[in-house]
Amino acid sequence: MELWGEIRRRVLTGEISQRAARDEYGIHWDTLQKILTYSEPPGYRLTKPRPSKLEPFLPIIHEILQNDRSVHRKQRHTGKRIFERLRDEHGYSGGITIVREAIRDWKAQSREVFLPLRHPPGEAQVDFGFADVWLDGTLTKVALFVMTLPYL
């Protein structure tokens, strides 16, 4: 703001020429013309924000992603597949990039949060499970017992 006034004053009083002002301050010709035309820097013109083409389809995307949580990882929808379903089944006419951004935002907001566990000395954690292992050349399902002492 101070520089604006200084340049304006020096050029309009004839202290320096327009060419000298451009060279001395390293400004573009168009910028110098704005400085000489307006006593203060013109403000930005804000445009009215447009609604997103994707807005009506967000509940559908969220439903697909929520349902994907209950299926095997390899069977979940990709961003491209969700885009294709929106286009083919629901008449979406926007681009794939905005769909992928919406998916990324939803996943970031709905990520599961885990609290760190604190264990006193001598406390154990026990887990039971099953695994497929090769025993004597045959694939066999075995039961597992795992016990850990997590205090450290």
Image (tube, grey):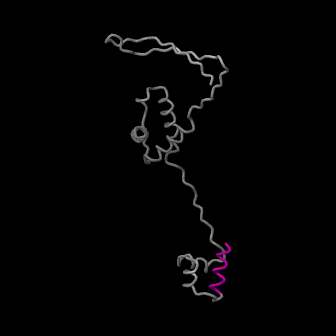
Q: Residue at x 46, y 11 (%)?
A: 143
Image location (x, y in percent) of residue 147: 55, 15
Q: Nearer the viewer, residue 52 or 7?
A: 7
**Image height check: is 54 above or below 144?**
below
Front residue of 28 and 61: 28
Q: Is residue 121 magenta?
A: no
Q: How many marks?
A: 0
Quarter of the figure with residue 79? top left
In this image, 145 relative to 78: left or right? right
Residue 2 image point, x, y percent: 68, 74
Residue 119: x percent and y percent?
65, 22
From the viewer's perspective, is residue 16 above or below residue 27? Answer: below
Q: Residue at x 49, y 33 (%)?
A: 65
Q: Residue furthest bottom?
A: 14
Q: Main secondary structure of the magenta part?
A: helix
Q: Quadrant of the C terminus?
A: top right
- Nearer-the-camera pick, 142 or 90: 142
Choose between 46 and 7: the one closer to the eye: 7
Q: Is residue 18 placed above or below 121 in the rendered structure? A: below
User: Looking at the image, which residue is at 63% across and 77% down?
Assistant: 38
Find the magenta span and give its range.
1-12
Q: Quadrant of the N terminus?
A: bottom right
- Identity of the residue drawn at 49% across and 15% down: 129
User: In x, y percent, where is residue 47?
Assistant: 57, 60
Asked where in the image residue 139 lies, by quadrant, the reply is: top left
